[in-house]
Image (tube, rainbow, N blue to C red):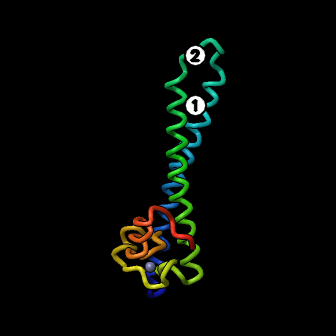
Amino acid sequence: MKDEEVALFRKQLLDKLKVLKGDVNVLENDVARSKKDSATHDISKFADLGSDNYEVEFDMEMLETESEEIQAIVEAIKRTDDGTFGTCAACSKRILKPRLRAIPYAKLCVKCKTMEEENGGPLDL
Ligand SMILES: [Zn+2]
């Protein structure tokens, strides 16, 4: 891949990272606030807090998903630095550009990704 193409993807990745990090900060604040709110409730009210706790758990799940995406983006940015960006981590073939345009942080080519999904879990790399 040409340097300027890699630079373009890198910019996209950084932009996405900024957006996601912004979102996660908001989410983290929300979770912190929910926890604080629960803590200020007196014990007698805890009996009917079921639904509130559920909400906090839901937020944490979202946080985890977003963090995984952030992790993938950070790794992709590293790959733009070490020159392996756009290369499949499993078979070392080039990842097709339409795939990278859709998922700039893709680390597997379509073939390996399909195999991974069929095997029902991440490849042991
Ligand atoms: Zn591959």
Residue density around tag 1, few if under 14, some if 14–19, many if 20 or more, within 10 Å: some
Above or below residue 83? Residue 16 is above
Quadrant of res 120? bottom left
Residue type (three-letter) at the residue carrying disc 2 = Ala
Q: Quadrant of the C terminus?
A: bottom right
- Element carrying mark 2: loop
Residue at image point 48% right, 67% down: 13
Residue at the spot of label 1: 34
Residue 62, x across and y down, in percent: 49, 45
- Asked whether 43 or 37 is in front, the reply is 43
Q: Mark 1 touching mark 2, by CB under 8 A?
A: no
Residue, far top? 44
Question: In the image, which is nearer the foreground, mark 1 or mark 2?
Answer: 2
Residue at image point 43% right, 84% down: 94
Residue at image point 58% right, 37% down: 31
Give the quadrant of ligand 1. bottom left
- Element carrying mark 1: helix
Residue 87, x across and y down, in percent: 48, 81
Above or below residue 97? Residue 106 is above
Residue type (three-letter) at the residue carrying disc 1 = Ser
